[in-house]
Image (cartoon, helix red, strand yellow):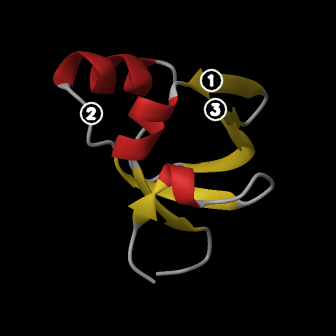
Amino acid sequence: MFPAPLTTFRAGETVRLCFLGTDEKTSTRLREVGVREGCSVCLLANDGKCMLGLGESRVALCREVAMCMLAERAGDS
């Protein structure tokens, strides 16, 4: 499967982030909080805002940022 925007996945799915696709400032901030290429996240919500579960942390993203991020289902390569 090819990477797709994070907003195309359903709540409850675990995905692997492939590409952030955001501006440098946003990408840097995402990496600082642990959201980076290659990490697996659980999509907790994807309606309006996108909520990611990353280990014991939760990260909320506005839809515009989530649409820029490409991911694939965990386990697909």
Q: Circle 1 sits on which residue? A: 60
**Residue beneath label 2, please?**
22
Residue 76 sits above or below residue 21 on the image: below
Helix, strand or loop for disc 3:
loop
Residue drawn 61% across and 76% down? 75
Judge by depth and name the residue closer to the eye, 62 or 75.
Answer: 62
Q: Please state which of residues 61 and 16 is positioned toward the viewer in this rendering.
A: 61
Upstream in sequence: badge 1 or badge 2: 2
Q: Label 2: how many residues lie within 10 Å, few (<14), some (14-19) or many (20+)?
A: some
Q: Earlier in the sequence, mark 2 or mark 3?
A: 2
The residue at the far left in this view is 24
Q: CA gap, disc 1 to disc 2?
A: 15 Å
Label 1: which secondary element? strand
Q: Position of residue 49 (x, y in %)?
A: 63, 29
Query: Which residue does the numbered mark 3 point to in the structure image?
Result: 48
User: Tag 2: residue type?
Assistant: Thr
- Mark 1: amino acid: Ala
Residue at left offset 76%, top offset 52%: 11
Q: Does the CB distance between marks 2 and 3 fall below 8 Å?
A: no
Amino acid type at image mark 3: Gly
Secondary-structure class at tag 2 = loop
At a point 33% along the width and 42% down the height, the residue shown is 20
- Whether tag 1 and tag 3 are in contact, CB under 8 A, the answer is no
> Where on the picture, by quarter, is residue 65?
top left
Q: Residues within 10 Å of mark 1 (few under 14, many from 20)?
A: some
Please provide percent x and percent y for residue 62. 51, 25
State the CA–CA distance, disc 1 to disc 3.
Answer: 10 Å
Which mark lies nearer to you, 2 or 3? 3
Q: Residue 63: horizontal and vertical position, in percent?
A: 50, 33
Mark sitting earlier along the chain (1/3): 3
Q: Is residue 35 visible?
A: no
